[in-house]
Image (cartoon, helix red, strand yellow):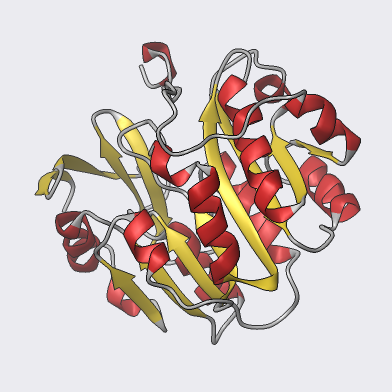
Amino acid sequence: MPGRYPVSFGEVDLLEDLDRPSGWVVSKDGVPQSYVDLDDPTYLDFEYVQLMAVVIDLLAEGPLDAVHVGGCACTLPRYVAATRPGSRQTVVEPDAGLVQLVRDQLRLKSVPRLKVRILDGRTATAALPDASADLLVLDAFSGAAMPLDLATVEYMGEAARVLRPSGTLVVNVADGKGLAFTRRMLATVGGAFGHVALLGEPGILRGRRFGNLIVVASRVALPYADLTRRAAGGMTVARCLSGEEVTRFVAGARPLRDGDAVVVPVPPPEVFG
């Protein structure tokens, strides 16, 4: 089962976790894309995924209607299925070969009430009904870079349309020194949703090193105090920026729009060795 596999957009490596016999990493071009524990879907190895789970755990109790734009090994859909039985979930993943690999090797068929659509995120989101989701998770990367067409004002308008009035958007953003892209991303998301928070490890938030940050947004007030407390006390110690902190962080950054000439940040070579 470990090895290199052809997929629709290149090749991926399937790597066994030597410390956890049921743990597996999907990696592409040396960049880890997903980690799943086949026997324990509540075990989350990547720190940014742990922060996403902090947000999901604070949503109203019970099953969720969730959309995940970016699938890979479907770590968070497995987590939601395990922690919120009865949830209905749709995963959007354009790489058909990757989806088939995950089905064949990583027990994707065992996840209840999960549908996978082989489409790009923009097309798939446009086809979703109005007010049909409680949660939209945007964790889509082409290699190590976020697709720019999923970060714009136009796309965020579609995301807001798909979410119910009290729904929550969760976005994984990767950024480095200066965090210029994250600032513009927050300006973009804030225009569509109004209530925004940013979670990240202190060193990343200060722009001292490249890493992942989690944007949380809704059209209703977010549980800022709980987000702050749980982020600080979890396996990954993180800060939560909200309210005036977000306003100061954005500091006049322009929202991203379709057609903008923007360089999406990618990690320096030393991040992944």
Q: Where is the N terminus found, in terms of image quarters?
A: bottom left
- Give the residue at x 68% y 25%: 253
Can residue 68 be seen here? The reply is: yes
Q: Residue at x 38, y 22 (%)?
A: 272
Quarter assignment of residue 177: top right
**Front residue (pair 133, 100):** 133
Question: Between 25 and 250, which is closer to the camera in this rendering?
Answer: 250
Pick out the residue farthest to the left. 6
- Coordinates of residue 71 in the picture (x, y in percent): 36, 57
Q: Position of residue 106 (x, y in %)?
A: 28, 63
Residue for point 81% across, 51% down: 227
Q: Camera-side residue: 174 or 273? A: 174
Q: Position of residue 43 (x, y in %)?
A: 53, 57
For this orientation, the residue located farthest to the bottom is 86
Q: Is residue 113 above or below residue 206?
A: below
Front position in the image: 174 or 45:
174
Q: Is residue 175 above or below residue 222?
A: above
Q: Which image quadrant for residue 38? A: bottom left
Q: Residue at x 52, y 66 (%)?
A: 79
In the visual, does 65 lie left or right of 140? Answer: right
The answer to whether 34 appears left or right of 85 in the picture is left
**Any part of residue 71 in sight:** no
Pinpoint residue 48: horizontal percent, then vertical percent: 57, 42
Q: How many marks?
A: 0
Q: Is residue 98 above or below residue 249?
A: below
Quadrant (top left/top right/bottom left/bottom right) for the C terminus: top left
Give the left or right position of residue 70, taking residue 188 as reference. Answer: left
